Amino acid sequence: MTPARRLLEALRTAGATFTVASGRLRYRAPAGLIGAEELAALTKHKADMIGLLEEEARRPARPPGPCELCHTSTWRWHPDFPVAGAGRWLCAACVGRLVPSVRDVADTLSVAAYERLLDEARAGDPLALILVDQLREARAV
Ligand SMILES: [Zn+2]
């Protein structure tokens, strides 16, 4: 994690909010949060923080509902998934379960097993829909 991201997350956790307006970093923070030390850090990392905030503004919207697999809403942005720079919201609760990788699974599926998975997806099974989508992406990469 970069110093700018660490600073941004620490101050957000403490209640600060940040925006970029006309290329300038703006913040709102609870009284007493931004002292001389924090102000010096903000000044030092201003350009990187503006870059982070602009990158956040370009992201697609966070998924509106809970994860279809685990029903939590612990979405976390992964800027380099599935490939560097692509970015995707992934469920923090489920992301640790992606072992073996979808590509590993795709390589072991028989034609019959893949057809059965497609049938389940066509029938609307949410897990099958996600797997089919992920398998298509894994095969396309
Ligand atoms: Zn989940």
Image (cartoon, rainbow, N blue to C red):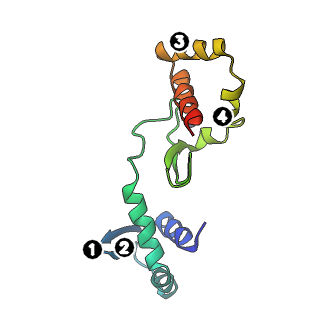
Work out how far the residue at label 4 is from the one at label 1, CA to CA, in angstroms: 43 Å
At 58% from the left edge and 30% from the top edge, which residue is drawn?
A: 135
Q: Which residue is mark 1?
A: 22
Q: Circle 2 sits in a helix, a strand or a loop, which is it?
A: strand
At 51% from the left edge and 55% from the top edge, which residue is drawn?
A: 85
What's under tag 3, amino acid-wise? Asp
- Decide which of 57, 73 is in the foreground and name it: 57
Work out how far the residue at label 1 is from the one at label 2, CA to CA, in angstroms: 14 Å
Q: Residue 82 in the image: x percent, y percent?
A: 56, 45
Q: Which residue is mark 4?
A: 103
The numbered mark, 4 or 1, whose residue comes first in the sequence reads 1
What's under tag 2, amino acid-wise? Tyr
The numbered mark, 3 or 2, whose residue comes first in the sequence reads 2
The numbered mark, 2 or 4, whose residue comes first in the sequence reads 2
Q: Nearer the viewer, mark 1 or mark 3?
A: 3
Residue 33 appears in the picture as rendered: no
Q: Is mark 4 within 8 Å of ligand 1?
A: no
The numbered mark, 1 or 3, whose residue comes first in the sequence reads 1
Work out how far the residue at label 1 is from the one at label 3, CA to CA, in angstroms: 51 Å
Q: Which residue is mark 2?
A: 27
Work out how far the residue at label 3 is from the one at label 2, CA to CA, in angstroms: 51 Å
Q: Is residue 134 above or below residue 114?
A: below
Which label was assigned to residue 119? 3
In the rendered image, which quarter is residue 110 located in? top right
